[in-house]
Amino acid sequence: MTIEACKRNLLQAIDDQANRTIALSGSWGTGKTYLWKQVQKESTDSSIKLAASVSLFGIGSLNDLKMRVAQALLFSLRADGALKAQVAAALSGFKKIAKSIHSGFGALDELALIAIPSMLRDKLLVIDDIERKHDKLSIDEVLGFIDECVQSYNCRIILVLNDDKLADKEVWEQFREKVIDQELRLETSPQEAFGIAKAIVSTKWPLELGAATSICGITNIRILCKIIRVTNRLLDGHCALSINVIERVVPSIVLLSAVYYKGLKNGPTFDYVVEHDAIIAATSRVIRRQAEDEESEEAALHGQWDSLLADLGIPSSGEFERLVVKVLQTGLLDTQEINGLIERYQLDGQILGVRSAVSIFIQNYHWHPEISEEQLADEMRELVAGAEHIETPTLSYLIDVADEITGDWLLGQQFVKSWSNAFKKTYPNGLQRPEWEPHQPIHKEITAVLDAAYARHSNVITLVQACHHIRSNSGWGSAEEHLVKTISEADYEAEIRSAKGSDLEGLLYQSIQFIIHKTSYEPHFGDVAERFITACKKIVESEPDSRLTKIIQRFFKARGQEAQLQLKGTDQ
């Protein structure tokens, strides 16, 4: 039952004095403890107001359990003066007797345990986190203690637990019949859970977050709080975001955060989400169904994931989804990068309009036989002007569809030209190769434009700069990798000849590492060691008496690499 219904039933169960032990169960994080605290806060019943609460988290023995109960009861004495005086008298009398037997008894903290009968009598005790107890404390010991409290001290017990996680389920089932008088199971709705979470962690986007978390069916309040915090961290600092931007980014943040914090049952993986493209997915399913007699379990699961993504309004993933994954996995937020993306979405609503139009076209192409191919071609022509805002895998797919629908390649080439012109204008100095390579096929003409941009970007840096970056960071980016991997012997020689001072020092120091640690660098940079050696040999052979030749010879010999230049007989 939902929180409100469960609250009413819990109060009714407590009012019925025949119920000595009441169990409040439910899944982890769905608000059981929150529900009890609400009942206690709102109640006017003194027994509920003065109820003592104890958590079994980590408790490993019955004695530890009793000590935890004693501490909780002593804390509640502040509000009950009569019981406080009664317990104090009991403890005082016991101390006198204990000291007469042995003087050490006066210092024992366990004296509080002796007062448990007095403190528990006619009291209401709440025991929480039963499933999180230590393995050394068995469930039958816990339930035996509960039975003793009820039978001997006329105490009433409320058990709060996640029964799905109980290890001793067989024992629990046996004692459930003998000890539990009434059991209530809390089934919190996603809407209720989010209502609690947003009261704990405030946000500027409650409606959008609430809608997305409800679609995902998330009822764990702790996870919902984490999702809200991630959203706030990514989006705070921006002025009023347009509804288009919010609808673009919030569902992706919710889904990826839910995946990371394990808030979904049989949910998609990071890789599946960041590589998602509804067009490719729909086409693949059609092909599989034609090729297979029965749908495989994996295909059925992927179909469920695609439906979830569609319900969230995520037709395809891109830069933003990859950035969210990076933030979740590393905890590091590149403010400039996220701001750039958000501002791009914010200032250019055309991106979202194009995405929406593409999604509508795909739906019409796949599932609306009443729409003619001529009408579909007209829809595609409307998309050409916004080609720059279409993700490259989707764009590649549209080019193939255009060729199919029109029977020629002219419309597809219009897509290529529109996208290519805008891309080159946006990235005149090239583009850094992304960490995530798309798994979906990219049209060959789109690939050629991208490769040229990656090459232009790598040419922006020099070999000296690349070597400095590799040496300083013990790593490299795509620009450094591309440059070092592709630089020719002649260009290597020219870089060495033009370098001076610290530039020459850094270039030679890092380059010699390519030789010394050849097996480590070769998978990334190819035969760069041989290209470096050849470049140095050409300098030495062409200018045997120059200062640069002597520096190179001395450098190689000092590191035991003189054989690479065949300089064994050469002086320093």
Image (cartoon, rainbow, N blue to C red):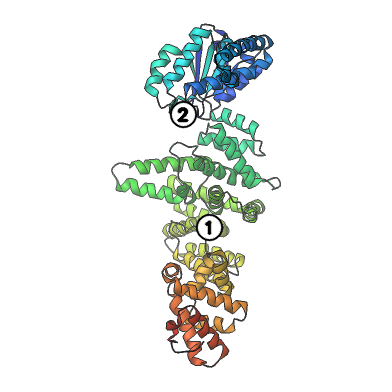
Which mark is first along the chain, 2 or 1? 2
In the displayed structure image, the side of residue 526 where residue 76 appears, left or right: right
Q: Is residue 313 visible?
A: no
The crowding category of the residue bearing disc 2, from other C-alpha atoms within 10 Å (few below 14, some 14 to 19, many at least 20), is some
Most distant residue in the right direction:
239
The residue at which mark 1 appears reads as 381
Residue 391 to residue 200: above or below: below
Who is closer to the viewer here, 112 or 65? 112
Who is closer to the viewer here, 71 or 430? 71
The residue at which mark 2 appears reads as 134
Residue 286's disc is none
Q: x and y percent of residue 182 in the render?
A: 48, 13
Q: Is residue 530 visible?
A: yes
Q: x and y percent of residue 109 in the render?
A: 58, 22
**Which amino acid, mark 1?**
Arg
Q: x and y percent of residue 463 in the render?
A: 55, 75
The crowding category of the residue bearing disc 1, from other C-alpha atoms within 10 Å (few below 14, some 14 to 19, many at least 20), is some
